[in-house]
Image (spheres, rainbow, N blue to C red):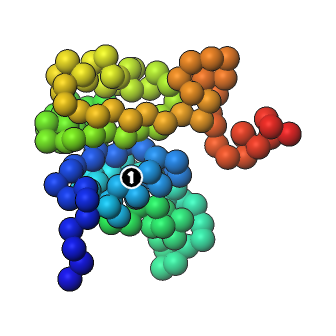
Amino acid sequence: MAQPGPLSGITIVDLSRILAGPYCTLLLAELGARVIKVEPPRQGDDARHYGPFKNGKSTYFASVNRGKESIALDLKSPAGRDIFERLLDKADALVENFRPGTMEKLGYGWGSLHPRYPRLIYAAASGFGHSGPYSHYPAYDMVVQGLGG
């Protein structure tokens, strides 16, 4: 039987998608953290639709989301928000990689969450950062490569 990892007892709420955030939380899960991946209902994480596929499932998605729990929540609905906030009540950290401003629009930016959950670690990843001339551009790998020439 495997020994508990150094992050055993730590709970991460994972709102991240595609690659950067899910890879980050994969590493945390591999170190023993309980990672709860929150996805939008119906379509889920966009990466669920990336090939290659085996038995109708995305191997790309599985490669960066293994070892995690998963829940579908509509963060714009009262019921979804209630469940999400109950997850945050017990969480040690929140990881997200939306475009800057998205969490604020949902009412879950750092400024809103910190007073309610003062012990919560808030980790936000963005390809072009949260300020500066490119901050509101999407930043997938090929976009950044194209910009770099």
Report the residue marked by disc 1: 25
Measured from the top left, where is residue 139 in percent x and y?
63, 37
Residue beneath the point at 44% across and 26% down: 102
Left or right position of 68 against 85: right
Residue beneath the point at 60% across and 66% down: 51
Measured from the top left, where is residue 48 in percent x and y?
48, 59
Residue beneath the point at 57% across and 27% down: 129
Mark 1 surroundings: few (<14), some (14-19) or many (≥20) residues within 10 A? many
| Furthest-front residue in this view | 6
| Furthest-right residue in this view | 149
| Placement of the C terminus among the 4 image quadrants | top right
Residue beneath the point at 25% across and 59% down: 6
Q: Which residue type does callout 1 highlight?
A: Thr
Q: What element does badge 1 sit on?
A: helix
Depth check: 100 or 8 in front? Answer: 8
- Against 136, residue 82 (above or below) is below
Left or right position of 30 against 142: left
Measured from the top left, where is residue 14 in percent x and y?
34, 46
Left or right position of 10 against 97: left
> Quick check: can you spot residue 41?
no
